[in-house]
Image: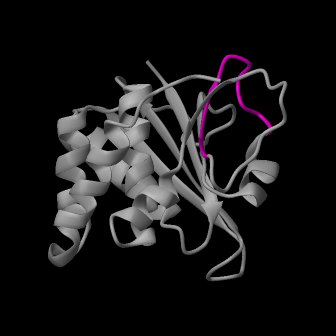
C-alpha cells in the first residue's frame, strides 16, 4: 500500500537525515519499496527544508509526494509552508515545543516535546531521532526493528548510544491524539 510521508523543519534539525533513515529502514530492513527526495532553500541552516518519502509494497510508479498521508513537523515555519496538500484524514506529528497548529484542523495530530526530550538526553541535535521513535510508534509505517537497524547504520559510531536512547524515548512516549 502506497504511503506518502513528509518530514519538515529547518536546516540543521536533521530533517533530511530523518527521511534518509526512514527510507533505509523501509527498503533495506522491511523489504518495502522506498523513494526519498529532499527540498531545501539556499540557506545551509535555518531555512525551511523537507524530506519526502514514498513507501509501497509494490514498485513505485511515481516518485513524488503529492498528498502526504503523514506530516512530521519540527518548526513553525515548516508547518506554515508544508501543511498544504495533506490528505483530509492525514496524520500530523509535531514537536509541541516548537510548533503550534490552529485549534480546528482536519487531521489527526499527535504531539511530543522532541527537542525538550533530546535536551534532557544531553544533546538537542537528537530531536530528529526522538521524532523518528515517535513516528515509528504512531504510524507503523516501518517496523521498530528496521528503524533501529537503519539508525545504527546511519549515524557515527560514537553517537549510536545517544541516538538509540533518543529513539527509545520517542517510541515509548505516551501517544495521545488531539
Q: Is residue 41 left or right of residue 136?
A: right
Residue placed at 62% from the left, 39% from the top? 65
Q: Is residue 141 visible?
A: no
Image coordinates of residue 53 in percent, x first then y, are 50, 43
Picture quarter with the N terminus: top left
Frontmost residue, 146 versus 93:
93
Residue 74 in the image: above or below residue 159: above
Q: Determine which quarter of the picture holds residue 69.
A: top right
Total marks shown come to: 0
Residue placed at 41% from the left, 30% from the top? 174
Q: Determine which quarter of the picture holds residue 30.
A: top left
| Magenta-colored span | 84-95
Residue placed at 41% from the left, 39% from the top? 134
Image coordinates of residue 144 in percent, x first then y, are 24, 35
- Magenta residue check for 93: yes
Colouring scheme, one of rainbow, by chain, secondary structure, one colour:
one colour
Picture quarter with the C terminus: top right
Residue 144 in the image: above or below residue 3: below
- Magenta residue check for 77: no
Image coordinates of residue 128 in percent, x first then y, are 45, 58
Amino acid at each position: 500500500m502506497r504511503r506518502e510521508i513528509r518530514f519538515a523543519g529547518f536546516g540543521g534539525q536533521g530533517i533530511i537525515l530523518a527521511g534518509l533513515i526512514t527510507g533505509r529502514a523501509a527498503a533495506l530492513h522491511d523489504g518495502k519499496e522506498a523513494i526519498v527526495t529532499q527540498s531545501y532553500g539556499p540557506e545551509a541552516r535555518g531555512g525551511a527544508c523537507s524530506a519526502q518519502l514514498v513507501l509501497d509494497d509494490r514498485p513505485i510508479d511515481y516518485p513524488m509526494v503529492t498528498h502526504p498521508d503523514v506530516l512530521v513537523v519540527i518548526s513553525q515555519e515548516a508547518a506554515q509552508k508544508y501543511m498544504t496538500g495533506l490528505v483530509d484524514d492525514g496524520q500530523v506529528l509535531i514537536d509541541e515545543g516548537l510548533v503550534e497548529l490552529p485549534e480546528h484542523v482536519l487531521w489527526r495530530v499527535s504531539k511530543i516535546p522532541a527537542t525538550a526530550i533530546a535536551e534532557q538526553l544531553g544533546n538537542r541535535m537528537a530531536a530528529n531521532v526522538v521524532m523518528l521513535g515517535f513516528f515509528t510508534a504512531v504510524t507503523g509505517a516501518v517496523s521498530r526493528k528496521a528503524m533501529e537497524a537503519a539508525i545504527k547504520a546511519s549515524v557515527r559510531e560514537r553517537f549510536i548510544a545517544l541516538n538509540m536512547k533518543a529513539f527509545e524515548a520517542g517510541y515509548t512516549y505516551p501517544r495521545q491524539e488531539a
